Amino acid sequence: MDLILSAIDILMRWDVALALLAGSVGGVLIGAIPGVGPAVAIAILLPATFSMDPIVGLTVLLGIYGSSMYGGSIPAILINTPGTAVNALTTYDGYPMTARGEPRRALSLAYSASFFGGIFSVICLILFAPVLAKIAPMFGSREIFLAALLGLILVVVAHRGQALVAGALACFGIFLQTIGLEPVKYTQRYTFGQDFLGGGINLIVVVLGLFAISQAFVLLTDEDEKVRLTRLRGGMFQGLRELARHPRVAGVSASFGVLMGMIPGVGEFTAQFMSYTYAQKTSKRPQDFGNGSSEGLIAAETANNAVPAAAMVPLLALGIPGEALTAMMLSVFYVHNVVPGPGLFQNDMDFVVALYLALLVLNVLVLVFLLFATKSLIQVVRIPNRFLGVCILTLSFVGVYSLRNSATDCVMAAAFGILGYVLKRLSLPSVPIILGMVLGGIMEVKLRAGMARVKEPLDFIDRPVAFILFLLIIIVLAVHILRVLKDRKELKEAEWQTNRSSTSFGSLMLRRKNSFLKDHGKKVRARHSKLLRRLTDLF
Amino acid sequence: MPSERERRFAGPRRGQLVFALILVGAALLLLALIGEQTTWVKKTKLFAQPRFWPAVAIGGMVLMGGLHLYKLPWRRVSRYDLWEVKRWGQVFEFAGWFMGCVLLVPVIGYLPVTMAFVPLLCWRMGYRSRFMLWAGVAFAVIVVVLFKGFLSVKIPGALIYEYLPGALRSFFILYL
């Protein structure tokens, strides 16, 4: 109780209240505009938050992260275009509801489900915080290195069908963070004798280029879309009542969101997929899923909104971000010399709880705002794409230039913008680059510190947590290899249009050998040679 | 007709081969330069060597990028790839607009440059209506006032602000 009171004390400031309001309203607006998204907004706002207190800056960014998904459901439901990438599943059941004349029901249900997901995850994590505070100190250098490695591997293997290129891009990210003066031996690495590379490549420059400037380029080279909005009539409160009729789906989906959010690299998509599949399999009307099912909408929206609070766990407890948005937030901590990790949980637990309470208040603010302002808010969907592109490019300038007033930074950001544009055109992921940069730096420092006390390789995993993490890495890699082999087998079966017991060359030869040795094989071959003889005799 | 391997490929075909070739080529170039661009320090363990992490990163890029290239279902650059490369080239124009803004702000000032930049780029994008152009100007003013006036982001005052009279000069340098 004392902890919660001291956390409330941290939040009782006018600038925190303003940050909460700006974050929640801004996040909803940003989420509601297709083509912007929280990553772009957070990347642009990062340098502006450096001059604020850590709690104020983080509240704004968390506000945008937590509330953008609420806003993202609006265009997903009304015009079948997800406002943020994670609202894609909302279109499956949200838009069919709009098509059959129930947009108000769909929206209010999405808000209620999102609200439940957000509140559920925050309460879970506040209750879970004391346990985390006990576990976090068990993480030394070796454990943090292994956890960062596990996070990076999970991010790579999560890109199904693109794991190789995602791995190459993650390595590119690791390479980027090695550029500059090496901090222990003071030697230059890949600076090519240039002074501007001596200080290394700034993460914010890369983030702004890959997320904000590239998105501006995408919008500027795209066509404007014609949007036809459905008119909304009546109140928005019916969703809360309808949500109460599906407590099981909402509860399980929120739990999936919390669990998946805590695992680095997994995030909203897996949580949504699992909860949607669960809801469909256990529903009395599975045929309605994809055609405007309220349960489907609840599953998708609850799961994705339960993730932001949970995603803060690896960041706060271990200092390891699990995805791009939390990686950006890590830089806010570093700027203020607050090092997230076990120490933060031991010494500043009230700060951690204050962040969670801020998220709790934020969810309430967003719900109230949306229940009353949706009718006016939906007009933002009408902003033309290319005009948005102009706006994002203008804002990106503030983000990059205000960092160090350096034209070189701007050239680099523009170059990463072009790279991000190419990646987006090819549907390749840019998140591994960011995580490679952040986790690569952590891994370098922690491996050096961890290996200092290790005499034999196996000593590295002689502590229980390190051993468990090592085991998890092996399991993840093994599961990925099995999945790749299964995909390969399916591909060969589809190519050969046959379903054989095995598609490997060795097995094929073995089957051929068995066929030669068996009596039936001999009979078949004798018959074939007889027929062939008859045929050749004809000529 | 696309083969089964092409159908199952995640993402569009256009440009994939060119990107993979550039990725692997750049990685091989970096690998070739590793001896020159990094140092091997004597009497230091492998994991503490300054060369260790660049080697891991570039080795990973070469290995995984190479495997990605090998696994691509296409072996020849088609005309679609070339069209895609031309499309990538289009964004250099907008990168030029961005850099123009960067170079002009320290000379002319953040507010005047933004107020000109947004409507001009809107015009370039094909918006001719007065409403859109004025919306651009309004957006520019809001951005400058919000970021430089309220949030006090670090954007230096322009050279031409020096010629303004006393109080106005310091106001412009500080807030616009």
Image (spheres, coloured by chain):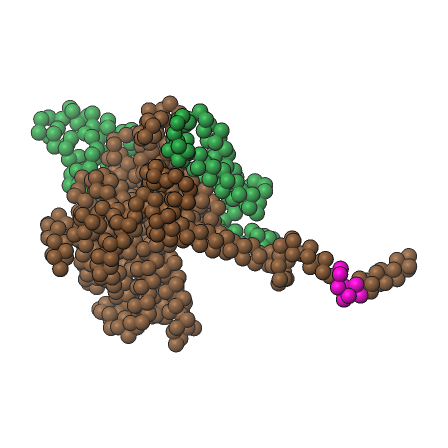
Chain colours: A brown, B green
**Magenta-tinted stretch:** A516-524
| Occupied quadrant, residue A288 | bottom left
Q: Position of residue B146 (x, y in %)?
A: 18, 42
- Is A456 displayed left or right of A249 in the figure? right
Q: Quadrant of the C terminus of chain B?
A: top left
Q: Nearer the viewer, residue A231 or A83?
A: A83
Q: Is A433 colored magenta in this rendering?
A: no
Tell me what residue is drawn at x 21 percent, y 42 percent: A338
Please identify the dominant SS of the magenta region.
helix
Tell me what residue is drawn at x 76 percent, y 66 percent: A520
Specify the farthest residue to the bottom.
A284
Tell me what residue is drawn at x 75 percent, y 61 percent: A517
Q: How many marks?
A: 0
From the viewer's perspective, is residue B96 above or below residue B11? above
Q: Is residue B112 visible?
A: no
- Is B141 displayed left or right of A270 in the figure? left
Q: Position of residue B49 (x, y in %)?
A: 39, 31
Q: Position of residue A184 (x, y in %)?
A: 32, 30
Tell me what residue is drawn at x 54 percent, y 54 percent: A485
